[in-house]
Image (tube, grey):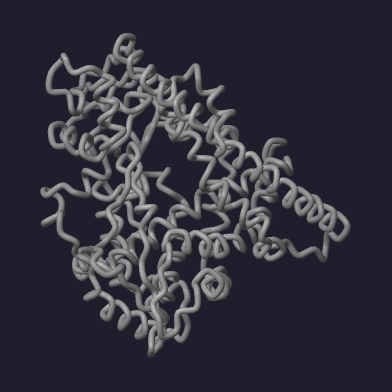
Amino acid sequence: MEDIRGAIIGAVVFSYLVSFFIHAKNNVKAPVAGRSSWLTPSFLLRYRFCRNASSVIAQGYNQGKTSMFRLLCTDMDLLVVSPKYVNELRSLPESDLNMSHALYRSLLGKYSMLQLNLSSNIITRSVLTKLTPALPLFIPIMQEELKLATSVAIPECKDKWEEIDLRDVLTRIIARMSAHMIVGPDLCNNEAWLDASINYTETAIANGIILRLVPAFLRPIVYQLLPTAWKAKRCVRESKRLIVPLVEQRRKEQAENLQGYVKPNDFVQWMMDLANNDDERDSANIAHRALIMSQASIPSSTLGATQTLYDLCAHPEYIDPILEEVVAVIKEDGVLGQKALQRMRKLDSFMKESQRMNPPISLTFQRYACKSLTLSDGVKIPQGTQLCVASGAIAADPQLFHHPERFDGWRYYNKRLNPAEENRHQFTSVDRDSMHFGYGTHACPGRFFTSNEVKMIVIHFLLKYDLAFRPGEGRPKNMTHDEMIFPNLAARILIRERETQR
């Protein structure tokens, strides 16, 4: 292992040195964030981005937020455009400006096992046309899974404080909550599937992130040496072992009973129904895409719920008002359903403020220029340019947000008190000031499912448990890697059953 680590470190150093001497020229006329002098070497700027991307992005945004600036990232250059361009850019066809190709390049899709996302958009189609309309139907199912998963994942803590790894606990809870929607009742409690979905989530994308540090010509070799790569491949094999027979059995049952067959209502079935070519109909591909769906759903909900609960621990004065709203809405509606979740405006506002302060990623609206473009003001974007928006820096802009450095759980709740804006500023809303879920037609299609899942988890935890940081500790500081932001992996909190549960 020490030899492998030494080889990787050597490769990183070599990569930086090579970038200094043969760094590809970028024809975009835009300042480079963090470059105070033309003498500053490219490898140093890339190292700074790797270590503290948020600071570099903020510096570039403050200098060029009305136009654009360049970022020298770990393994590529990015053109960060002003929000004023996004409406024009969103209207361009995929043949001109492509999101899938941009994400594939950013995450090194060849090594993150995202090839199936390039060959088909069936996952997006399934979410938009099947999942989102069915959200109300899944709420009671997810609630039951939440109760069961919580009883297993959280240790006995009646009349005593227990220490937990909140992120790990929530990952396991959310995997079970999401599983019923993805693979249906036959596999949702299958431990082999749950393990595969969790492990794939934690390893597949990690491969691409790790290999960003490695020169392109060495990546195929280093990839074969990565334990995360071995684990991700095992997860795909396990998914195929479980789901391929399921798909074939469903097809057989439907063929034998055309009139009386009742189709299951889950993501696997939706992909089967919407498939319109051999790639989409292939049983092995359906199995792999089920894993990719888990990869999309589990981390987003885990990050959102973890950050929200951390912020509630850090700002306990918000707990009682949120609980009062929750109890009042459930009592009025008689059940925790879709309408009830949408009416919980204080909880929604708190979640959105938590996301504003702790975005999962600093750069969104990633696009790849498939051809040279000329914008309406004459700005030229060369073919091959990868562009994005500094969504994290936008969310901290004092010209857009009053005291952005302060946590204000009612920030968006108060905005919605204005009748003209009561349907805006929601957790799932996207606009030029809030692009954590992207923007335009390619805004994250699963954000409504994520919103429901996070709200149900926060409600369940607040009604049943007390949460606190360990004595002498405050809110865990976030960790970063390049533009990615995530909760501190070493953080632990205390949990105890409430003496009086509401």
- Identity of the residue furthest to the top in this view: 21
Q: Is residue 237 above or below residue 450?
A: above
- Quarter the C terminus occupies: bottom left
Quadrant for residue 269, please give it.
bottom right
Q: Residue furthest right?
A: 256
x and y, in percent, of residue 385 in the image: 35, 22
Q: In this view, does 501 lie above or below 269?
A: below
Q: In this view, does 92 lie to the left or right of 83?
A: right
> Can see residue 88?
no
Q: How many labels does the image show?
A: 0
Q: Would residue 461 appear left or right of 475 to someone viewing this image?
A: right
Image quarter of residue 129? bottom right
Residue 310 quadrant: bottom left
The residue depicted at 25 percent of the width and 74 percent of the height is 316
Vertical placement of residue 395 versus 418, above or below: above
Residue 224 lies, in percent from the top left, at: 59, 28
Name the residue rendered at 72%, 36% in the picture.
278
Instruction: In the displayed orientation, state which residue is furthest to the bottom.
Output: 500
Q: Is residue 271 left or right of residue 336?
A: right
Residue 123 in the image: state x and y as whole percent: 57, 46
Kindly give the residue lying farthest to the front in the view shown: 2
Please tell me which residue lies in front, 67 or 323: 323
Name the residue: 49% across, 59% down: 171
Can residue 229 be spotted in the picture? yes
Q: Residue at x 43, y 76 (%)?
A: 460
Q: Name the residue nearer the viewer: 129 or 336.
A: 336
Q: Position of residue 289 (x, y in %)?
A: 62, 45
**431 left or right of 111?**
left
